[in-house]
Image (spheres, rainbow, N blue to C red):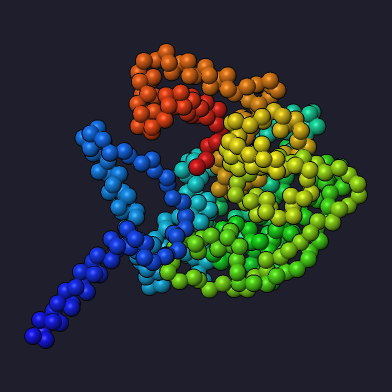
Amino acid sequence: MKDKTLHNILFWLLMAFFCLPALQQCAGLFHFKELEGFVATEEPVKLSWKTLKDDSFQKYCGRRAKNGFGFREFYIRTYNQLMYSCFNQSTNDHIVIGKNGELFLRQYTDVTTGKALRDEFGTVDSAQRAAISNVQETKRWMDTLRARGIQLLVVLAPDKPAIYPEYLPDDMQRLAAENPFSLQETYAELYRQYGIPHIHFTPIFQEWKKTTPYPLYTRYGTHWAHSTIPAVTDTILRKMEELLQRQLPSVQYVDSNLTTRYQASDRELEGQLNLLFPLRHQRLPMPTFALKPEGNDAKPNLLVIGDSYFTQLEGSPFMEAFNRVDYWKYNKQAFSTESTRSEKVVYIDRYKILDETDIVVVMFTSMYAYKYFFGFLETLEETLQDGPDYDWMQEVRSTIQRIKADPVWYESVKRQAEERQITVEQSLLDNAKYVYEMEHQKLNVP
């Protein structure tokens, strides 16, 4: 009798264990921290005879079940923790675990090992020829901008493998020694030859590394550490001051704020590991600083075309040195201190922004040296050719007429409207805008 009771208890406990994930999925009994990293959005598939027949609804339900089952976050973090703690491995293909627990972004180690060179150009000679051509075009457009009263400054941001190569895995250090070519260094040398104003932060950081008591990159970050932002700000402002021939504010250090509570960018790779337990953080400065005005010169207007390295400056007192800042991230999405200018770059009044700008800064790291200027030189040429009276909606309206004149295309648009449960007019507009973006978007990076 006791054995039967024990068997019943074990049976129901086992059933509860199997049913608990489904119960968690439906009722959300426990709260777990969301997984970090990129999550692709997916359009829902409506239940219909057509979606059942072509199997799209069933596949959609399968994906939803896979991505939403109960305790998913807990299971994934537990597995990731096991792989990291027991085997020193990352389940995230974009993260490389180096020596002493240093984390690197694979896109940057691909530059260091020569993979980016092979994938993009094949040979050093091809890369050098492309670099010379790009710099010659940059010189031509620099002169064009200067004739319009606009200065150009190129900021070559550093990357972690270039500053801390000693922490790379041994096999990557060997590959780096076998592939010493650096496209970013090539650009820096060409800028010197062609007289293009620039700041090359890699040698600057290498010098700072010799004297600073704190790391310039955190163990779990891939952007320059927040502790470097005051010095980076001062370096950029002094170069701008030289180009603009006007006084800009000086940096006034307020407090070092030693802490183990990192800013998001200082622990971003740790976050993307999605471990069960947090990693140990060493005490680092998260400094506060202010800008001290110098003289009575008017604040300039700044246009930045850059990658994510600028976001740390964007959230600092650096912005206070300017009357207005427009930031075109990857030359795709515009952010501005004026809300009306925050939109996709293809839809904003680029000519007006350029006309009001005093200095253009193009900022990129070694990874994006292979995607030169994010296509900005082509955007610049198109903007000046279109002129101040250009109206992008005219092209969109023209595309709508082309769609209506094409029976096959028009029927496809109407089917999309039905599937998305929107009006045909809205579907026409969405399709025409998509065509416009594909024809005019100069971005050539993810």
What residue is drawn where x is 73% and y is 69%?
Answer: 256
* Residue nearer the viewer, 234 or 123: 234
Q: Is residue 39 left or right of residue 397?
A: left
Counting from the top left corner in percent of width and height, residue 303 is at 71, 40
Q: Quadrant of residue 85?
A: bottom left
Counting from the top left corner in percent of width and height, residue 436 is at 52, 26
How many discs mark residues in the rendered view?
Answer: 0
Q: Is residue 48 left or right of residue 341?
A: left
Counting from the top left corner in percent of width and height, residue 239 is at 79, 48
What residue is drawn where x is 63% and y is 31%?
Answer: 348
Q: Quadrant of residue 158?
A: bottom right
* Residue nearer the viewer, 338 or 262: 338
The answer to whether one can see residue 200 in this image is yes
Q: Is residue 237 left or right of residue 35?
A: right
Instruction: Give the residue furthest to the bottom.
Output: 2
Q: Is residue 302 left or right of residue 273?
A: right
What residue is drawn where x is 23% and y is 34%?
Answer: 49
Image quadrant in which the N terminus is located: bottom left
* Residue nearer the viewer, 142 or 317: 317
Q: Is residue 311 above or below residue 30?
A: above
What residue is drawn where x is 42% and y is 24%?
Answer: 424
Q: Is residue 174 above or below residue 361?
A: below
Instruction: Give the residue furthest to the right.
Output: 295
Q: Is residue 163 above or below residue 183?
A: below
The answer to whether one can see residue 175 in this image is no
Instruction: Give the residue furthest to the left.
Output: 1
Counting from the top left corner in percent of width and height, residue 157 is at 65, 51
Instruction: Give the residue furthest to the top.
Output: 405
